[in-house]
Amino acid sequence: MKVTELEITVHPAEPDAPPILALFHAIPGVGSVRVVVRTDDGVSGAAEIGFGRATGRPNSLAAVIEHELKPVVLGTDTAFIRGTHEAMLRETDYCGPTGLALYGISMIDVALWDCIGKAHGVPCWQLWGAVRDRIPAYAMVGWPNYGDEKLQRVCAEAVEHGFRAVKIRGGFPTMEEDVERVKLARKAIGDDTKLMVDGGQNLTVAEAIRRGRALQDLGCYWWEEPIPTHDIDGNVAIAEALDIPLALGENLHGVTDFARHLRCGAVDIVQPNMRRAGGPTTLLQIGTMADAFDRRYASSQADGTVQLNVMACLPNALYLEADVLDPTSLPELTDGHISLPTGPGFDWE
Ligand SMILES: [Mg+2]
């Protein structure tokens, strides 16, 4: 099955879309890029990813795909998908195969696996070999712009919807604010729901350790990105000082970033983001590598069904992040778990 066409569609960010407020900055309307790969067998596969913050980013990514990646992919045999993945990394190495290049590689990887799954009429997890038939999911609900009342309401709605774990943002200017948010969320979700806290890379090492001790005393489940992710020494110091697991990885690029953090003991739970990791091919590598270090895997976002398909095949998979502002728009949950998708490639059904 040879790749004969690669179509790119840009959906620019709407200039007047209501912004989402992250901790200290607003994210303007989200633009996206869609890629469709067509083959000489008549089978096609697709991938779509969105962006925040920068309105020019979708067009920049489209240019990288059109001028650097598309020439590598056209004419290749989908049976050699890992070879194509390597070829795209080599092609972009001159300027560094991270950043936007890796976003493009990730999208093409998704579209190619989607083709292969559709050609065989099975979900990708069946191609790779699964270890489980459902995945625990948590809801990211505690956005920092939520006032106390909204924070509690959205936390309670997530539990009502069936989640057994929720995540809120911490890393506020003072530890007292972080502790207060945790207590408010805990009141809303009860004692049986797990509570994770994301520090948003905002703290110093000393402050991350101080707050991490408070969070572990409050029974929180993981402490995510309290300091900049690329500070390996700092993250090693935090992981060594605390009992609460240190989760990070959404801002790491490619398999080698994860290899360094794992080798140094700078992470307890890896959280690769599909767009920055390199697509499902690399997510599987990262997950397997983390398993060899006896570390767990949690997704950063879900990216449609991509992370579900990957996590089905990882023995160390811990939690899927439900990356929506409205948890009620999610698929049905049973006991806090999402069933595996049954559609071919990356289709839901
Ligand atoms: Mg995060």
Image (tube, rainbow, N blue to C red):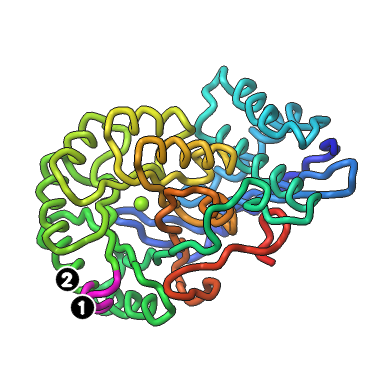
Name the residue: 61% across, 21% down.
90
Q: Quadrant of residue 23?
A: bottom left
Choose between 215 and 66: the one closer to the eye.
215
**284 magenta-colored:** no
Query: x%, y% of residue 59?
Result: 62, 42
Name the residue: 64% across, 22% down.
91
**189 magenta-colored:** yes
Q: Amino acid at mark 1?
A: Lys
10 Å crowding of disc 2: few (<14), some (14-19), many (20+): few
Choose between 15 and 58: the one closer to the eye.
58
Q: In the rendered structure, are the residues bearing label 2 and label 1 in contact, judged by CB atoms less than 8 Å apart?
A: yes
**Which mark, residue 183?**
2
Query: x%, y% of residue 329?
Result: 53, 74
Choose between 79 and 316: the one closer to the eye.
316
Q: How many marks?
A: 2
Can you tell me whether the CB of the residue at mark 1 lies under 8 Å from the nearest atom of ligand 1?
A: no
Q: Which residues are magenta?
A: 186-193
Query: x%, y% of residue 284?
Result: 53, 41
Query: x%, y% of residue 163?
Result: 40, 73
In screen coordinates, is 83 left or right of 39?
Answer: left
Name the residue: 77% across, 37% down.
78
Q: Quadrant of residue 236?
A: top left
Element marked by disc 1: helix
The CA span between labels 2 and 1 is: 6 Å
10 Å crowding of disc 1: few (<14), some (14-19), many (20+): few
Q: Which residue is mark 1?
A: 187
Choose between 205 and 113: the one closer to the eye.
113
Q: Amino acid at mark 2?
A: Lys
Q: Quadrant of the N terminus?
A: top right
